[in-house]
């Protein structure tokens, strides 16, 4: 695996991806991009999107940069003030891949793109559906920008989501 990673570094050494991976491996020599994306897809993304749709800031907090945490806290506050609840059912997560890697503010940044299928059903305080239906499936494409931040509790660098963008969301047919 390390030899393959080293060969990959050689092939991509002058690209933004190569530069970013070299910086990541300086701090974590055992980092393998494909394994990291696989772990995100299997474990983290289902947890993240379910918590996001539920408005569960407590679950999300360890995975968010300070700025992203504040942004989501405000989004969830507005959602709660309006009495809206989103259906938290995520049916599938697919096509997770790194769409960009670069050095920003002297640190490596990885941008992950992923497609999720989820139930689009928004209810008001009384439980009445105000958008979508109980069985309406949507496909939504998200971009998540990951950076490494020092986590004092863990005493190590941890990947955090610094930005989140919804590329598109449309009915899944």
Image (cartoon, rainbow, N blue to C red):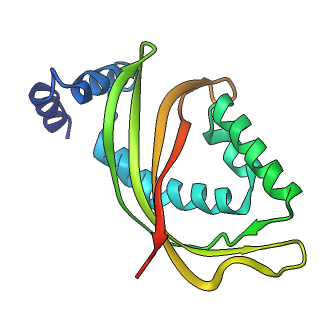
Residue 30 in view in this figure = no
The percent coordinates of residue 117 (x first, y second) are: 48, 71
Left or right relative to 46: residue 88 = right
Left or right relative to 134: residue 14 = left
Residue plotted at (67% across, 58% down):
51
Quarter of the figure that contains the C terminus:
bottom left
Quarter of the figure that contains the N terminus:
top left
Residue 38 in view in this figure = yes
Residue plotted at (84% across, 80% down):
127
Reply above or below: 62 against 87.
above
Reply above or below: 119 against 1.
below
Residue 2 falls in image quadrant: top left
The percent coordinates of residue 94 (x first, y second) are: 37, 64
Q: How many marks?
A: 0
Residue plotted at (66% across, 30% down):
67
| Residue in the foreground of this view, choosing between 37 and 26 | 37
Residue 32 falls in image quadrant: top left
Reply above or below: 55 against 1.
below
| Residue in the foreground of this view, choosing between 132 and 146 | 132
Reply above or below: 58 against 67.
below
The percent coordinates of residue 54 (x first, y second) are: 72, 63
Residue plotted at (74% across, 47% down):
75
Left or right relative to 9: residue 81 = right
């Amino acid at each position: 695996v390390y030899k393959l990673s080293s060969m990959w570094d050689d092939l991509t050494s002058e690209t933004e991806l190569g530069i970013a991976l070299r910086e990541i491996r300086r701090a974590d020599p055992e980092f393998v991009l494909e394994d990291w994306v696989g772990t995100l897809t299997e474990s983290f993304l289902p947890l993240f999107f379910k918590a996001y749709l539920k408005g569960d800031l407590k679950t999300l907090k360890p995975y968010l940069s300070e700025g992203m945490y504040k942004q989501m806290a405000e989004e969830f506050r507005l959602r709660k003030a309006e009495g809206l609840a989103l259906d938290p059912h995520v049916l599938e997560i697919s096509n997770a891949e790194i769409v960009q890697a670069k050095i920003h503010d002297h640190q490596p940044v990885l941008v992950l793109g992923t497609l999720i299928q989820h139930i689009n059903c928004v209810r008001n305080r009384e439980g009445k559906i105000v958008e979508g239906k109980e069985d309406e499936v949507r496909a939504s494409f998200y971009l998540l920008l990951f950076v490494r931040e020092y986590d004092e509790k863990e005493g190590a660098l941890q990947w955090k989501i610094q930005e989140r963008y919804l590329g598109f969301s449309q009915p899944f047919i």
